[in-house]
Image: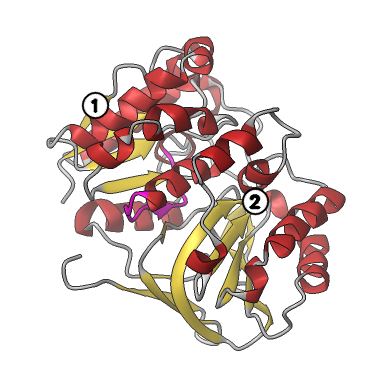
């Protein structure tokens, strides 16, 4: 059972803004009701402008959270867009490598980049939920499917399997105090969809938000993402991707089909789809471009034998499961399940 959670702002500094105070209070209370102590790392609540201007402070919080033996789990507040700026403060003098020890790290969206950072130093992480969008969900309770996986993680330290949610939710537009207690509109969910390839495949999973991954290869958002990520060898070599399963999910930006095609093409040009054992794809938020993305995946991925499993409830579409990275996974599309096999020491 997790005793203490350390909450970090590694991307956006929204946690420190007064307009989310009602959400923060709700999420903190929910965590404490599990019997968990909650610590907001020193810089996590300093606001959007401070966090934007001080990537070194964000990096220090992450290092502190790993060094603090009392913190069992590191929980990211939310995503953002520039967590790549932590790279020099974590890798220039091996700061991250010297600080890390195996403990639970959970986040998604722009936190994809932090997952790659931690993968680089040998830490297994968990992808798919975050404090503000999940624990602080404004409904009377956390969304049941989301809650199920979060409770499994904090009580066992693992996720043993994931199955599809029976429903998906249309995203909120109102996050004000007036929305407290208001339910989200739900729709029937069709489950995992095998686009092609064998229904059974296995391997360790790595990946995340495709827009964040694209930034590693493209400077359209910032002018130094490519150079910094190359300098610190953030993206794994092609040989390190062999027999792995790539997870891809799309952000709240709802990238156009033309941009989605470009992002898939970048990964194709890298050679990724020639060495993987399979691809997992998250449900697009609000099912926007659901069919268009499917067609692009089938057309742009040249390896017709590569299994592609679509419509996972992970990432920006709600509700959200949690996917372990760096753990042996066995996918069975026929049985609508992905199981995880932990080594004895885990």
Residue beneath disc 1: 39
Tell me if residue 343 comes above or below residue 326 in the rendering: below
Front position in the image: 333 or 110: 110
Kindly tell me whether residue 44 is visible in this rendering. Answer: no
Residue 303's x, y, as percent? 72, 79
Instruction: Estimate how packed mark 1 is, as few (under 14), some (14 to 19) or many (20 or more) residues with alpha carbons within 10 Å.
Output: some
Kindly tell me whether residue 291 is visible in this rendering. Answer: yes
Front position in the image: 137 or 300: 300
Instruction: Say which residue appears at 29% left-offset and 31% top-offset.
Output: 63
Horizontal placement of 325 versus 85: left or right? left
Instruction: Say which residue appears at 74% left-offset and 55% top-offset.
Output: 266
Residue beneath disc 2: 210
Mark 1–mark 2 Cα distance, whole angstroms, equals 30 Å
Question: Which region is colored magenta?
Answer: 121-130
Residue 230's x, y, as percent? 58, 42
Q: SS for tag 1?
A: strand
Horizontal placement of 257 versus 170: left or right? right
Residue 64's x, y, as percent? 24, 28
């Amino acid at each position: 059972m997790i005793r203490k959670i350390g909450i970090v702002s590694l991307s956006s500094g929204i946690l420190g803004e007064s307009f989310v105070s009602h959400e923060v209070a709700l999420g903190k209370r929910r965590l404490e009701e599990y019997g968990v102590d909650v610590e907001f790392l020193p810089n996590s609540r300093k606001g959007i402008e401070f966090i934007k201007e001080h990537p070194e402070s964000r990096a220090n919080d992450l290092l502190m959270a790993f060094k603090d033996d009392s913190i069992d789990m590191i929980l990211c507040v939310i995503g953002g867009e520039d967590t790549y700026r932590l790279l020099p403060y974590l890798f220039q003098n091996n700061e991250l490598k010297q600080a890390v020890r195996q403990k639970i790290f959970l986040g998604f969206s722009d936190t994809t980049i932090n997952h790659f950072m931690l993968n680089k130093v040998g830490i297994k992480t968990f992808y798919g939920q975050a404090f503000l969008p999940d624990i602080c969900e404004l409904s009377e309770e956390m969304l049941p499917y989301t809650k199920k996986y979060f409770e499994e993680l904090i009580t066992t330290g693992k996720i043993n399997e994931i199955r599809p949610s029976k429903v998906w939710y249309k995203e909120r537009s109102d996050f004000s105090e007036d929305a407290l207690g208001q339910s989200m509109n739900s729709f029937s969910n069709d489950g995992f969809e095998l686009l092609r390839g064998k229904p059974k495949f296995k391997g360790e999973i790595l990946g995340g938000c495709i827009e964040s991954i694209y930034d590693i290869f493209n400077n359209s958002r910032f002018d130094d993402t490519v150079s910094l990520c190359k300098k610190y060898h953030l993206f794994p070599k092609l040989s390190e991707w062999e027999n792995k399963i790539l997870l891809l999910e799309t952000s709240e930006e709802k990238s156009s089909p033309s941009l989605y095609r470009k992002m898939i093409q970048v990964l194709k040009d890298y050679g990724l789809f020639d060495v993987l054992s399979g691809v997992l794809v998250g449900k697009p938020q609000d099912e926007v471009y659901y069919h268009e993305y499917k067609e692009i995946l089938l057309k742009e991925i040249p390896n017709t034998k590569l299994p592609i499993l679509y419509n996972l409830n992970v990432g920006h579409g709600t509700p959200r499961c949690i996917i372990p990275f760096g753990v042996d996974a066995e996918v069975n599309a026929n049985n609508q399940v992905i199981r995880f096999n932990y080594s004895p020491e885990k």
